[in-house]
Amino acid sequence: MAAHTLGCGADGGAPAAPAAVSDEQRAAALLDPGALLPPRAETVALADAVAIASSRAGGGAQAAALAELAGDLRVRLFRLDQAATDAREAMELYSAAATAFRASADPAHLERACQAERRRALLAGELARDAAVAYRELYLVSRRHAALSPPAPPGGAPPAPSPCLGAIAVALAQAAAYRPSGDALRALEQEGHRVEGVALALAQGAAPGASAAPASAASEAPVQATADASGDLVVAPPASAAPAGPVKVTSIERHGSDKGARVVIELSAPTTFNVGTLPADETAGKDARIFVDIAGATSRGVAREIEVGGVLRRVRVGVQPKGTRVVLDLAANLYRRIFYLPEPFRIVVDVSTRPPVRDDEAKPGGAREVRRVAIDPGHGGNDTGAVGPTGLKEKDVTLDVAHRVAPLLARELKIETLLTRDSDVYVPLELRTARANAFHADLFVSIHCNASDNGRARGVQTFSLAAPHDAEATSAALAARENAARAARGGQGADPGDPDARREVAAILSNLNVGDMAARSRHFAELLQRSSLASLSPRYPDTKDQGVKGAGFFVLAGADMPAALFETSFISNPEDEARLATADFRQKMADAIVNAIRAYREGK
């Protein structure tokens, strides 16, 4: 029988070493109202350590509980010091906790997600010293979680009421005097509709049709998508995508402006990653930060610090025990969207001063606000695009059409225009969208020339970003061709017909279409298609209408405005190529783009 000694025994045995106290235990102990807080710097460091542990835990209930604990500790600091930094940090942590709890299938965790968001909403009102702010935030939380509440089974008893939603209902009733009215109320209700839509879209997971995948592929969702209370979005590979071998960060591309920024982290092979955020801490002199922890990745040869400018001050790269951390130092707390693209595998981080979901409905007079338009001439530099039978290059046609569109928009519609390239240079696909986002464009048009293998296809066609139906094999092949230039540069490649690869791309793109952006892009594409036929038919009555379709064009991925890809004609067809070579045909293409933008702005 083993003997156990407590303390110093009479036999002179050494006392047992005290068990080490974890950061989590220390933080939990400090939440006791009677506990004395250590100096502020020490308490902040402890809260940060728990927050980092939450990020390293990946997702799920453990990560959520740690984020919630760190938030609670920050709230206690806020109650004592009234430092706004503590409140903002707690709000971020509560958002992270809610996101992680919602990712769980356990109904109890959905309730905890609601409670975390309720505390965030109340804290937002307290920080603003404005009950109207608390009312707005609580209302949006109630809309989101009412939409996510499980329905009653057919013929069964209704589920137990949510204590969280009940508490929110009481708080909203008590704050009824601060409920907005008139246009402000209608705007809040519209925002509530959008919040519900985003929540339901993310709860549904992969794109429609994913269930048709083979059982071996359907056992796990092709991507993991999460969004927090402020609409920030993360689309990442599933945990099973962890690398089997070495992975290297091969390059970090960046584009910054005073309105937004994009960072593209390219890797030698697919891997998993986790994302975390920290708000600015004025007392510690720290900027707001986003960090991406990339599993199993090395970064030898990549600069450790890259100055950028605008809202993105710099990008920093550091070594982690099990991978690489890339940190973005921001000039302010911004809206964030992080996703990945395959072939080659790259992680895309977008930040912006404008929200990802905006009200773009036609105003009472019928008009939509369109002040800036981004025009993207496809290909360029050593990427010629498709080449016609007589040698006409797609890159030359698209640039000429873009040069015709820009002055027309300025002169006729008084619209400011950005060309993603203004000369014969190569611009990566992700940088084109980044420039449009940073420009805060209201519309994005990518101009291309179509091509077919047999050279017989003719006509004009327009695409919006979407997962094509299985029957649209031609659309998938075309998107694969347009995306191929980037893949060739990355040295990676996959069979575009691979059903698993297509399913993965479909899931990524489905989750990037936030709110009603997909519908707005589709509508703009339809206007562009109709406008092109109206412009061409009088002079070229045999123009074939190839219609409007959805496909996975990477150049459209991550655009935070309605976006369309316009295939002017088939450069692979001798007759279409001959027309594309003429100034008259190109001008009619430019007129079509301008008229489509005009129609969209007029609310048509």
Image (cartoon, helix red, strand yellow):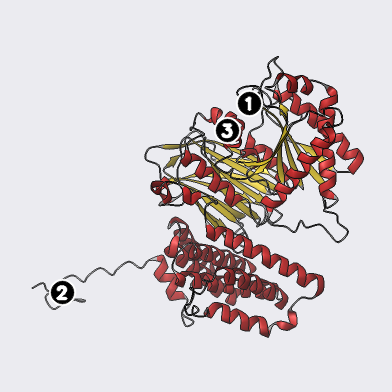
Mark 2 surroundings: few (<14), some (14-19) or many (≥20) residues within 10 A? few
Q: CA distance from mark 2 to mark 1?
A: 81 Å
Q: CA distance from mark 3 to mark 1?
A: 10 Å
- Whether residue 503 is situated above or below residue 8 in the rendered picture: above
In the rendered image, the residue lying farthest to the left is 1
Mark 1 surroundings: few (<14), some (14-19) or many (≥20) residues within 10 A? some
Tag 2: residue type?
Answer: His
Residue 91 picture location, percent across and down: 59, 67
Instruction: State the SS at label 1.
Output: loop
Query: In the figure, is residue 266 to the left or right of 180?
Result: left
Q: Residue at x 52, y 56 (%)?
A: 205
Tag 3: residue type?
Answer: Ala
Q: CA distance from mark 3 to mark 2?
A: 72 Å
Instruction: Please name the residue that numbered disc 2 is placed on.
Output: 4
Residues marked 3 and 2 touching at CB (< 8 Å): no
Image quarter of the N terminus: bottom left
